[in-house]
């Protein structure tokens, strides 16, 4: 038997309605914040990611699905959305638009060759936003507020926002030197990755999952102690805006995002729900003031975040939040006999034409079996149409929640249902 590839999953109807509900919340939230959707290709030139994500990152070094196409181009299934969005911002000269920042969101599958575990897939769906073209710390607060809103609207309560500042290039360089001095004498006690990071990108040692508990980690020089005046002032503004929006946060000087191009604000949103499992990060984001230039555009600052729908759904499960199933049918039509079935076909079509979700039985089963189906399908109303009803051009309409039943003339059935559906809203 052929099964789905490791790290991927089928989303069946009993789950897909949850995805749809969450996707609707996301699109509505982006709309109220006026972020517009951008859709970029699923694969890009490999170079986009080696440059845009950074060739010292885990993503580029270990996780990319890279292949050669039949024209010998090196292409990569996108592992994240920021590089593609910024590429499009440069390629379509969105930096020339009069209104900056350009506020974009994306939602779609991303691909990373990872070890499969709960909350970690090889194909997963990321929703992310990017506000490109403004260095206003108010934008940082807006981006964070949008992410928090999505989780809150979905019904999550056990959330924690963790915040840090990586500072500007000068601050980072001063910090980098201090890091090298701190780790170099004992770097042989660290994993091979960290030994490489010491030369290429020492900041990322702090992000290492294997050496997390090494004693030198806790005593490592903190970025926040190396922020120059300008960077510290910027960070203070971000915090002040978050305070104004009444969004609580925790400061974590060791929070460094995995991607090379971040500076200033870095943040993660975690789930604090008990039983959420080992991976508690729901979303990560931050500022990337050098990325547009790195990808061939003019110097334009940007900030964004990304979250996966998979982890959002896991968090909902951990908090036992039930999402409404808006895909349940309004009406289930039970026909008993040949002639009633003919009439039922017409009735179902009329209901559907009127925008009512309706279906009927195709197995010609007995009343009891059909009632059970209607129940399983969570139909709000059941129509019963037998020979007697047909003779008097009527239909029995039963409201499943109350058990109330009424005899309605067939030509009025559609309006009857519309009216009652409206009232029960
Ligand atoms: P992690 O440290 O968990 O590997 P990351 O730094 O690789 O995270 P980002 O690249 O910042 O994560 O991606 C942003 C968000 O995308 C994460 O917070 C998480 O919600 C989600 N995400 C990342 N990788 C996966 C994956 N393999 N499966 C499901 N969701 C993922
Ligand atoms: Mg990762």
Image (cartoon, rainbow, N blue to C red):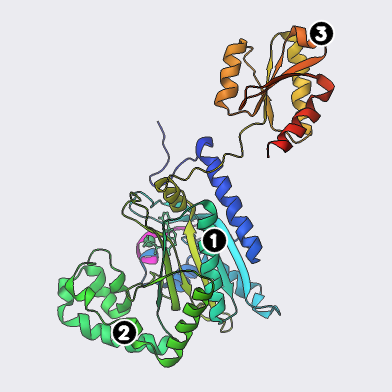
Evaluate if marks 1 and 2 touch, with contact meaning CB atoms under 8 Å apart. no
Give the quarter the ligand 2 occupies.
bottom left
Nearest to the observer: residue 322 or residue 263:
322
Q: Nearer the viewer, residue 68 or 7?
A: 7
Q: Do tag 2 and tag 3 residues touch (Cβ < 8 Å)? A: no
Q: Residues within 10 Å of mark 3 (few under 14, many from 20)?
A: few
Q: Tell me where the magenta segment starts and ends, as one range.
A: 60-68
Give the residue at x 53% y 80%.
137
Q: Earlier in the sequence, mark 1 or mark 2?
A: 1
Q: CA distance from mark 1 to mark 2?
A: 35 Å
Give the label on residue 391, or none. 3
Q: Is residue 350 visible?
A: no
User: Disc 2 designates what residue?
Assistant: 176
Q: Quadrant of residue 418?
A: top right
Q: Residue, x 58% and y 46% (percent of image)?
A: 20
Tag 2's secondary structure?
helix
Mark earlier in primary sequence (2, 3) = 2
State which tag comes first along the sequence, 1 or 3: 1
Looking at the picture, does residue 281 appear above or below residue 48? Answer: above
Q: Nearer the viewer, residue 341 or 417?
A: 417
Q: Which mark is residue 149?
A: 1
Q: Is residue 379 left or right of residue 305?
A: right
Badge 3 residue CB within 8 Å of ligand 1: no
């Amino acid at each position: 038997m052929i099964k789905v590839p490791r790290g991927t999953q089928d989303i069946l109807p009993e789950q897909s309605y949850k995805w749809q509900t969450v996707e609707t919340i996301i699109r509505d939230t982006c709309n109220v914040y006026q972020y517009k959707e951008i859709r970029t290709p699923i694969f890009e030139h490999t170079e986009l990611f080696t440059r845009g994500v950074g060739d010292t990152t885990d993503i580029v070094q270990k996780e990319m699905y890279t292949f050669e196409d039949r024209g010998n181009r090196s292409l990569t299934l996108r592992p994240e959305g920021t590089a593609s969005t910024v590429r499009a911002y440069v390629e379509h000269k969105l930096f020339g638009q009069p209104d900056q920042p350009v506020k974009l969101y994306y939602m779609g599958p991303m691909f990373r060759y990872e070890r499969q575990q709960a909350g970690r897939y090889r194909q997963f769906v990321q929703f992310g936003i990017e506000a490109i073209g403004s260095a206003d710390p108010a934008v940082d607060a807006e981006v964070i507020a949008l992410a928090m809103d999505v989780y809150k609207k979905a019904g999550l309560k056990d959330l924690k926002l963790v915040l840090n500042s990586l500072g500007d290039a000068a601050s980072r360089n001063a910090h980098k030197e201090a890091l090298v001095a701190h780790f170099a004498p004992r770097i042989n006690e660290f994993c091979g990755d960290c030994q490489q990071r010491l030369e290429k990108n020492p900041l990322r040692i702090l992000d290492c999952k294997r050496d997390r508990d090494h004693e030198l980690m806790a005593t490592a020089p903190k970025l926040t102690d190396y922020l120059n005046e300008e960077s510290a002032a910027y960070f203070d503004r971000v915090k002040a805006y978050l305070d104004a929006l009444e969004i609580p946060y925790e400061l974590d000087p060791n929070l460094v995002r995995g991607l090379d191009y971040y500076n200033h604000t870095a943040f993660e949103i975690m789930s604090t729900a008990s039983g959420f499992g080992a991976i508690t990060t729901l979303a990560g984001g931050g500022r990337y003031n050098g990325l547009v230039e790195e990808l061939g555009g003019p110097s334009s600052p940007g900030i964004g975040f990304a979250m996966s729908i998979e982890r959002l759904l896991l968090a909902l499960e951990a908090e036992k939040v039930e999402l409404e199933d808006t895909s349940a049918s309004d009406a289930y039509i039970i026909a008993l006999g040949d002639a009633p079935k003919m009439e039922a076909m017409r009735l179902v079509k009329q209901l559907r034409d009127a925008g009512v979700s309706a279906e009927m039985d195709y197995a010609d089963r007995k009343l009891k079996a059909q009632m059970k189906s209607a129940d399983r399908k969570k139909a709000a109303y059941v129509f019963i149409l037998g020979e007697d009803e047909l003779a008097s051009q009527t239909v029995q309409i039963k409201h499943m929640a109350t058990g109330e039943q009424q005899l309605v003339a067939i030509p009025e059935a559609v309006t009857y249902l519309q009216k009652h559906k409206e009232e029960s809203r």
